Image: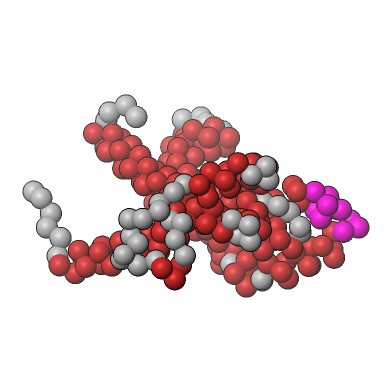
Amino acid sequence: MRRRFPVWEWAVIGLCTVFFAAPMLAMARFALQKVPVALLGRETLFSRWTFSGFTNTLADESFLPALWLSTRLGILTVAAVLVLMVPTVVWLNLTANNWRPVVEVASTLPYIVPPIALVVGVSALFRDVAPWMVTTDYGMIPLYSMLCLPFTFRTLDAGARATDMRTLTDAGRNLGAGPVVILMKVIIPGMRTSITAAAFLGFAVVMGEYAIASLLLRRTLPAYMVEAQGREPQGSMAVALALLVLTSLIFILLNRSDRTSGRRDTIGLPA
């Protein structure tokens, strides 16, 4: 039977759509129209649309190095966070549930400690002990990993709670599987959706982080875009719009992929 949506549900969907689409449309007009901001109105809605600012920004010799640096840092940060947090979440849900409040409080510290205080503290503490954390690009990975903790921990913990992890672990042990086999072939496949979501959220955080890169004088993509606004404001806005659209499409594709996989698992079809 077809499910009927109440009026209030359609109203919420409509408001969320407007809230999400209106800023993107405004960004598109500013970024892709060679019209002064004061003249943007109904009369100029279809005039002088161009991709010149976007292509000029992509052709800038500083754009690709900044994009590659942010991409590299994002991939390495996601790998570090998952290696740290997946075993931690499994440990909490299987044997150490009493430690959950401690981990939850620790994961919220990036909300409490501002990035400028974090960078100043790390610089003062590790400048002589581990100078690579201040002098190299890869020194930002531990800082980015801390920023990703609030998102990754809750996403992974929700996925772990959604699976009957203890029963699956006991079944694996009864069949003679060791801890590594249980983790890789039983637990992680059951948390595939949450791991994918946590990885993408962590990558998005790194791709949009500006404060730490600016304080450490690293030209990541956000730092480059802020710098490029003085030369090509429309081009930098067009790049930001493209990244926002790409991020939204990836979220939609991940959601559809997870739903398709869930339906296949339910009816017994091969994934």
**What main secondary structure does the magenta stretch of the protein show?**
loop
Q: Quadrant of residue 16?
A: bottom left
Q: Position of residue 142 (x, y in %)?
A: 70, 53
Asked if the magenta segment contains residue 38, the reply would be: no
Q: Assign the C terminus to one quadrant of the image.
A: top left
Q: Residue at x 66, y 71 (%)?
A: 114
Question: Residue 144, located in which quarter of the rendered image?
Answer: bottom right
Q: Is residue 47 left or right of residue 37?
A: left
Residue 129 is one of the magenta-drawn residues: yes
- Residue 14: percent from the left, percent from the top? 25, 64
Residue found farthest to the top? 270
> Where residue 190 appears, x then y in whole percent?
43, 41
Q: Position of residue 116 (x, y in %)?
A: 71, 69
In the image as oriented, which residue stretches furthest toward the right? Answer: 128
Residue stretch in magenta: 127-136
| Residue lying at 74% horizontally and 63% vertically, measured from the top left | 215
- Is 41 drawn above or below residue 201 in the view shown? below
